[in-house]
Amino acid sequence: MRPPPNPGQPPRSSPSAWQRFQHRLRHGGLPWLTSAVFNRLVPARAAIRHHVLQVATGAVGLEVGGPSPVFSRGALLPVYEHAEAIDNVNFTSNTAWEKDLVNEGPYVFSDTKPPGRQYLREATVLGGLPTGRYDLLISSHCLEHVANPLAALAEWRRVVRPGGHLLLLLPDPQRTFDHRRPATTLDHLRADRDRQTGEDDLTHLDEILRLHDLGRDPHAGSREAFVARARLNPENRCLHHHVFDLELMRAALSETGWQPLALERTRPLHLIALARNGA
């Protein structure tokens, strides 16, 4: 499954770079411009980068929601160039970001390595993928789009071998369009798991429509377009069902049997967690 969006990878028919710049400047003003220039001139460095690349080197990996620029060569966490092989999961063959995907077709994650295999699956049900198949599971800005995150994390753990790892990136709400929304509670995630909440769930729609900051979301278009898209979320998966902070990330990982090793906030808008499958 690949519930969009993935920052740095705009959807098809998205506004141009110049239009996005004008939108953010109009709404964010000088503070946004100063931050954007700083992030461009002083690239972010993740404190756990060395540990992540040690884990990734030679690994057979599975990505949920790829491809992700943050994992490419020269990026924040260049997992693609260090892993031996990577397969991928997207939720359907045509998303807002990808088209014409083929189940068990090729997944091109690097121009220097053989393609992995593309699977079309829900993030919560990786049917047909063997238990303990992978050394590493990676996912960037995907889990917040899943209606039942604890079910997804438990299923991701199933396909990772004991002693294998999870590298999870989520959006930092204070730096994105979710900054007005409260962080989701662990009890809420438990309730979603216990009632087996599916991807047709629109529990959070009213909150999103009230608190989503369109000024920080140049891809959303007009208010009317955003509302129309949001109501079709079971088809497009664009909404952020849940809002995570580092505390909730740690709690959700522990709840599903992962052992959190390191968590951090990293510019420009990432929450990062590295966890181990201690099963």
Image: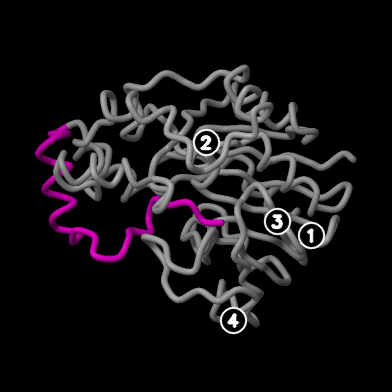
* Dot in front, 2 or 1: 1
Amino acid identity at mark 1: Tyr
| Residue under numbered circle 2 | 271
Decide whether residue 37 is among the magenta residues. no
| Disc 2 from disc 1: Cα separation | 23 Å
| Residue under numbered circle 4 | 112
* Dot in front, 4 or 1: 1
| Disc 2 from disc 3: Cα separation | 24 Å
| Disc 4 from disc 1: Cα separation | 21 Å
Magenta-tinted stretch:
1-30
Percent from the top left, x then y, of residue 47? 59, 39
Q: Quadrant of the C terminus?
A: top right
Secondary element at tag 2: strand
Percent from the top left, x then y, of residue 202? 42, 33
Are there few (<14), some (14-19), or many (20+) residues within 10 Å of tag 2?
many
| Residue under numbered circle 1 | 134
Of marks 4 and 1, which one's residue comes earlier in the chain? 4
Q: Are marks 1 and 3 in contact (CB under 8 Å)?
A: no
| Disc 3 from disc 4: Cα separation | 27 Å
Judging from the image, the colouring scheme is one colour
* Dot in front, 2 or 3: 3
Residue 274 figure quarter: top right
| Disc 1 from disc 3: Cα separation | 13 Å
* Dot in front, 3 or 4: 3
Secondary element at tag 3: loop
| Residue under numbered circle 3 | 126
